[in-house]
Image (tube, rainbow, N blue to C red):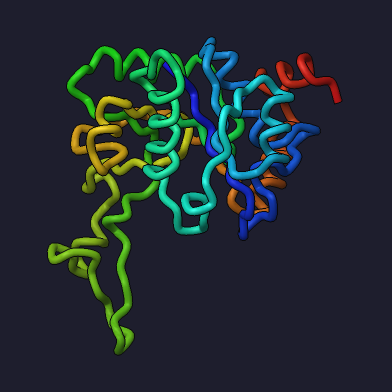
Amino acid sequence: MLAIIPARCGSKGVKNKNIIFLAGHPLLAYSIAAARLAEIDNIIVSTDSEDYAEIAKQYGAQVPFLRPPKISKDNSTDYEFMYHAMQWVRENKEFCPEYWVHLRPTTPLRNPDIINVAATYIINNPSATSLRSGHLAPESPLKWFMKDSKGYFEGLNQDSTTEKINQPRQSFPDVYIPNGYVDIVRSSYVLNSSNLHGNRMLVFETPQINEVDTDNELKYLEYTIDKSEPLILKYLNKINPR
């Protein structure tokens, strides 16, 4: 098993988002710490930045390569960086791990025990092509609607009607919001296909967790940390005191 943390530079929404400081530590450090606390020995940061690479190394991650610019653009996909990393490991190391734990820096406050539960779940389901985490949506998007060019109701699908979407939320099936808590993909699948998750993706339900995509979300996380110092922050302060 290997943990991989994507951290390209050039974020538009929050400038330098992957290394912005949260409670005295860069955001990507939290994902490195989560992997270490989950006792994953191999931790790789995939970045296109020498500066990001140095920060990652300071917190105990490996950066054996720099990600090529052509797959480090705003519209580059997760598949591209993952395939590149897997191919590099397969060509340059003696062994390419089967399970790759994908930990995005934008979801910093994880419980390492939940990462381990996810790993056990996919290992016990060998027919699964991948695993993605999500939390239960507070309201089903099947109750949502669009507006047509004349300003009238337009349903999300052919079954949507104005009366159907007004039914109680209990009438709708559960829907999960992907949250970046922990995703796991298999190298045997990714290296032999053009897909990342495949058609047998396990859904792994986690507690609701906050991501950092805006300045306001970062401020909310700072508020959360001020109220109760999480385990992962205690660990970071221990290995790299502020």
In this view, the residue farthest toward the front is 91
As rendered, which of 165 and 202 lies closer to the eye? 202
Q: Is residue 236 left or right of residue 129?
A: right
| Rendered view: 44 above or below 67 | above
Total labels: the figure holds: 0
* Residue 123 screen position, x and y as percent: 29, 14
Q: Is residue 195 left or right of residue 233?
A: left
As rendered, which of 77 and 214 lies closer to the eye? 77
* Residue 95 screen position, x and y as percent: 39, 14
Residue at (45, 33) in percent of width and height: 85
Residue at (24, 56) in percent of width and height: 167
Q: In this rendering, does residue 71 appear at all? A: yes
| Rendered view: 47 above or below 234 | below
Image quarter hosting the N terminus: top left
* Residue 27 screen position, x and y as percent: 67, 37
As rendered, which of 105 and 50 lies closer to the eye? 50
Q: In this rendering, does residue 210 appear at all? A: no
In this view, the residue farthest toward the bottom is 150
Residue at (27, 52) in percent of width and height: 168
Residue at (52, 46) in percent of width and height: 68
In this view, the residue farthest toward the left is 159
* Residue 189 screen position, x and y as percent: 25, 30
| Rendered view: 71 above or below 129 | below
Image quarter hosting the C terminus: top right
Q: Is residue 11 left or right of residue 203?
A: right
Which of the 4 quarters of the picture holds residue 58? top right
| Rendered view: 86 above or below 239 | below
